[in-house]
C-alpha cells in the first residue's frame, strides 16, 4: 500500500504562504512601495485600477535589479537584505524576509521591468501564478517598474472577500499617506483610475507633506511638536483643537520611521487634548518618535503593525507632555481658564448648537402632539395614583442579564410580553442627565435618552425618505468643504445617493466643494462638521451600493448627531414628550445601532432584592 502522505507542490505552498502576507490590494502596494524605499528611490508613482483589484503598478527610480537579481528576487526567502537581526526596529530596511515578491507572483499576473545603473539593457520578467513565463531584454530607465494584474485570480476565495473599489482604494490611500508622512524626502504620487489622489512634494518637509494629504484648511491649523527626554525624541504636527474629526483614523504614529498602531499613543493624545475638545472628537496628528530600540524594547506584530513597548509609562508621558507643551505654546483662544472652565470647554459651539437643535426637534414634534400629550398627562396622573401591580407575565420569569453596578436583574424591555404603553409612564427624573428614570405599570424603567431620541429621529427620517425624496433645505451661505482625494472619490461615487437624501453638492475647483443644500431634517445642524462626518462615514462603510442601505446609514449618522446627547438636562415636559414619541416609534426598544433604548426592572425583582418576597 502506497503512503497517503504527499509533498505539496511548490505552487500550492506559495499560494498558502501568499495568503499570510497578502490579504488585499493594499498589502501588495505596501510590499512593493517598501521595496522601492529600500532600493533608495526618491520618486515613486503608484497606480491602481478598480481599487487595485484589476491592476497595481509601482514605478520607482531606485537602484533597480540586475537580471540574475531580478530572477532570484522572485524566489521565496530570497532577499538582498540582512535577515540576521531579530528586532524589526533596529533593521534599517523595511522588508527582510524575502517573501513578498514570491507571494505576489503566486497569486497574480506579474510583470517586472527593471534596470540597474551598471547594465545597459533592462530586464522584463513575466510571471503568472508563480510560473516564470518570459525573460527578455527591454529598454527601461534605471529603477523598477512592477505591474500586478488580476490579483487573487487563482484564489477565488480571497477574491470574494475583497470589499468595494472605494474601500480598497481608501486602504491603499491610507498606506501611501502614511508612508509619505514617514518619508517626506520621497515624492509619492498615487493615481486611481486615472485620477490623482496624492502627490507629495518629496522635499523633506513633513508640513508640506501634510499639506498635500490634508489640504490647506488643515495645514493652516497645525502646531509643531518638538520634545525630548532622556530616552526619546518626539517630533511632528498636531491640529489646533478647532480642527477635529469623528474618528482617530487620521492619527499617525511612527517609531523610528515605521508606521505603527498603538492604543497607548492614541490614549496619550486624547489625554493631552482632554479639556480642549469634546470626548468623541479626535485631532489630526502625525507624530514621530525616535528612540533607541535597545533602551526601549519594541515588539511589533509584523502585519498588523501593533506594538508593545517596555517602558510604557515613559512613552505615554513623552507623547502627552510633548502635545501639552505644544498646545500651551500655540495661540489658542481657548487657552485661558483652561482649568477653571473645563466643564464648559468640553462642549464646543457645535455641540451647543446641536443640543439646542435636538431640543427644538423634540419640541416641534411635541407641538404636533400637543393634544395627545395632554391626554397622556391625564393618563399619567391617573395611573400614577394607582398602585402598580407586579406583573405575573411569563416573560418576567425569564432572567435578564446581570447588571453589575446596580446588582439588579434587568431585561431589555423589548423582551417582555404585553408591553405597557410608554406614554403611560411617569418620568421620575434623570440619572446623570443621561437616563430617564420612569415608573411604569410593571415596575421601574430606565430609558437611554440619546438612544431613544435617535430611534425617533431615525424612523422619521426613513419615513420621510420613503414618501418622497428627503426634503432639501437650501443654504443661504453654502458650506465650503475641502476634501481629501479619497473623500472626493466616495463623494463622486455616492453623489446620486446623497442627492436623494437632500444634499446638493457642487465642485468648486481643486479639492474644494460647496454644499448648497442639506436634508431639511438636519435643521440647525447644517454645520461643516456634520457634512464632513457624513462623508467620512460613507467612506468608512464603502461597501454600500444600494441606495436603501446608504439611506439607512445616513439616517443613522444624522439621527446620532442630532439626537439629544447624554449629559443634557431635560425638563419634565421634554421627558414626557420623549416617551410619547418613542411609544409611537417602530422598533422602539432598540436604537438604530442596535443598542437597547429601555431597560426594565420588574416590581417583583425589586421586591425580591429588598427581601420582601
Ligand atoms: P524583501 O524585501 O524581504 O527582501 P521581497 O520579496 O520584497 O523581499 O524582495 C526580494 C528582493 O528583491 C529584495 O531583497 C530586493 O533585492 C529585490 N527588490 C524587490 N523590489 C525591488 C525594487 N523595487 N528595487 C530594487 N530591488 C528590489
Ligand atoms: Mg520586500
Image (cartoon, rainbow, N blue to C red):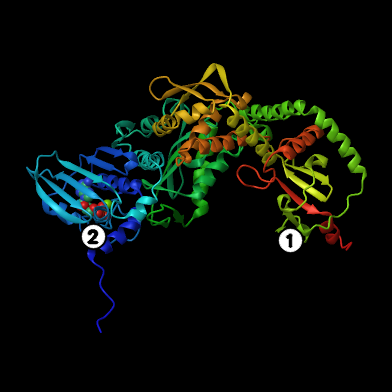
In this orientation, does residue 469 appear?
yes
Question: Which quadrant of the structure image shows residue 301?
Answer: bottom left
Task: Describe residue 548's horizontal placement relative to residue 196 as left or right.
Answer: right
Q: Going 25% across and 41% down the picture, which residue do you hit? A: 57
Q: Quadrant of the C terminus?
A: bottom right
Q: Going 26% across and 51% down the picture, which residue do you hit? A: 108
Crowding near pointer 1: few (<14 within 10 Å), some, many (20+)? few
Question: Which quadrant of the structure image shows residue 216?
Answer: top left
Mark pair 1, 2: CA separation:
57 Å
Classify mark 2 as within 8 Å of ligand 1 or not, answering yes or no.
no
Residue lying at the far bottom of the rendered structure: 1
User: What secondary structure is marked by label 2?
Assistant: loop
Q: Which residue is mark 2?
A: 76
Q: Going 48% across and 41% down the picture, which residue do you hit? A: 541
In this orientation, does residue 242 appear?
no
Is residue 605 depicted above or below 28 in this figure? below
Q: Quadrant of the N terminus?
A: bottom left
Camera-side residue: 229 or 315?
315
At which x and y percent is residue 202? 29, 34
Task: Describe residue 609's horizontal placement relative to residue 54 as left or right.
Answer: right
User: Which circle marks residue 399 in the picture?
Assistant: 1
Camera-side residue: 610 or 2?
2
Nearer the observer: mark 1 or 2; the answer is 1
At which x and y percent is residue 450? 68, 39
Crowding near pointer 2: few (<14 within 10 Å), some, many (20+)? some
Amino acid at each position: 500500500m502506497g503512503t497517503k502522505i504527499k509533498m505539496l507542490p511548490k505552487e500550492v505552498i506559495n499560494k498558502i504562504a501568499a495568503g499570510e502576507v497578502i490579504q488585499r490590494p493594499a498589502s501588495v502596494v505596501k510590499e512593493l512601495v517598501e521595496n522601492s524605499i529600500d532600493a533608495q528611490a526618491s520618486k515613486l508613482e503608484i497606480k491602481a485600477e478598480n481599487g487595485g483589484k484589476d491592476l497595481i503598478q509601482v514605478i520607482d527610480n531606485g537602484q533597480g535589479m540586475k537580471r540574475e537579481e531580478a530572477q532570484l528576487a522572485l524566489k521565496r526567502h530570497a532577499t538582498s537584505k540582512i535577515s540576521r537581526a531579530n528586532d524589526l526596529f533596529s533593521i534599517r530596511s523595511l522588508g527582510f524576509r524575502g517573501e513578498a515578491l514570491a507571494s505576489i507572483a503566486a497569486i497574480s499576473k506579474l510583470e517586472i521591468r527593471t534596470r540597474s545603473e551598471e547594465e545597459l539593457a533592462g530586464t522584463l520578467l513575466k510571471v503568472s501564478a508563480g510560473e516564470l513565463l518570459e525573460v527578455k531584454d527591454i529598454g527601461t530607465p534605471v529603477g523598477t517598474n512592477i505591474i500586478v494584474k488580476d490579483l487573487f485570480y487563482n484564489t477565488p476565495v480571497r477574491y470574494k472577500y475583497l470589499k468595494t473599489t472605494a474601500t480598497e482604494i481608501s486602504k491603499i490611500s491610507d498606506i501611501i499617506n502614511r508612508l509619505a508622512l514617514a518619508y517626506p524626502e520621497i515624492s509619492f504620487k498615487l493615481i486611481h483610475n486615472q485620477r490623482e489622489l496624492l502627490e507629495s512634494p518629496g522635499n523633506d518637509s513633513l508640513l508640506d507633506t501634510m499639506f498635500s494629504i490634508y489640504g490647506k484648511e488643515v495645514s493652516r491649523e497645525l502646531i509643531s511638536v518638538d520634545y525630548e527626554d532622556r530616552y526619546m525624541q518626539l517630533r511632528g504636527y498636531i491640529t489646533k483643537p478647532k480642527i477635529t474629526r469623528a474618528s482617530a483614523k487620521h492619527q499617525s504614529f511612527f517609531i523610528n520611521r515605521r508606521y505603527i498602531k498603538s492604543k497607548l499613543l492614541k490614549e496619550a493624545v486624547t489625554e493631552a487634548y482632554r479639556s480642549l475638545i469634546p470626548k468623541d472628537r479626535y485631532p489630526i496628528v502625525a507624530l514621530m518618535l525616535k528612540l533607541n530600540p535597545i533602551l526601549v524594547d519594541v515588539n511589533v506584530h509584523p502585519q498588523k503593525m501593533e506594538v508593545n513597548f517596555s517602558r510604557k509609562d515613559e512613552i505615554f508621558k513623552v507623547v502627552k507632555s510633548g502635545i501639552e507643551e505644544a498646545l500651551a505654546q500655540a495661540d489658542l483662544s481657548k487657552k485661558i481658564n483652561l482649568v477653571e472652565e473645563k466643564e464648559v470647554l468640553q462642549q464646543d459651539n457645535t455641540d451647543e448648537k446641536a443640543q439646542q437643535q435636538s431640543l427644538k426637534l423634540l419640541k416641534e414634534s411635541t407641538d404636533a402632539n400637543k393634544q395627545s400629550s395632554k391626554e397622556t398627562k391625564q393618563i399619567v396622573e391617573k395611573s400614577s395614583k394607582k398602585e402598580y401591580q407586579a406583573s405575573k407575565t411569563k416573560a418576567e420569569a425569564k432572567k435578564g442579564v446581570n447588571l453589575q453596578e446596580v446588582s439588579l436583574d434587568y431585561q431589555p424591555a423589548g423582551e417582555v410580553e404585553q408591553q405597557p404603553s410608554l406614554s403611560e409612564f411617569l418620568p421620575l427624573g434623570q440619572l446623570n442627565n443621561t437616563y430617564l428614570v420612569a415608573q411604569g405599570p410593571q415596575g421601574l424603567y430606565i430609558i437611554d435618552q440619546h438612544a431613544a431620541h435617535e430611534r425617533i429621529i431615525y424612523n422619521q427620517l426613513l419615513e420621510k425618505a420613503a414618501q418622497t425624496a428627503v426634503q432639501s433645505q437650501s443654504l443661504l451661505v453654502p458650506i465650503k468643504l475641502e476634501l481629501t482625494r479619497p473623500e472626493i472619490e466616495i463623494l463622486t461615487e455616492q453623489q446620486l445617493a446623497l442627492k436623494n437624501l437632500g444634499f446638493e453638492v457642487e465642485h468648486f475647483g481643486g479639492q474644494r466643494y460647496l454644499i448648497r443644500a442639506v436634508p431639511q431634517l438636519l435643521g440647525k445642524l447644517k454645520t461643516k462638521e456634520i457634512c464632513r462626518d457624513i462623508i467620512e462615514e460613507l467612506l468608512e462603510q464603502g461597501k454600500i451600493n444600494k441606495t436603501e442601505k446608504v439611506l439607512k446609514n445616513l439616517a443613522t449618522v444624522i439621527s446620532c448627531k442630532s439626537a439629544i446627547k447624554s449629559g443634557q438636562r431635560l425638563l419634565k415636559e421634554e421627558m414626557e414628550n420623549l416617551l410619547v414619541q418613542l411609544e409611537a416609534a417602530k422598533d422602539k426598544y432598540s436604537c438604530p445601532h442596535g443598542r437597547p433604548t429601555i431597560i426594565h426592572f420588574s416590581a417583583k425583582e425589586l421586591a425580591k432584592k429588598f427581601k420582601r418576597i
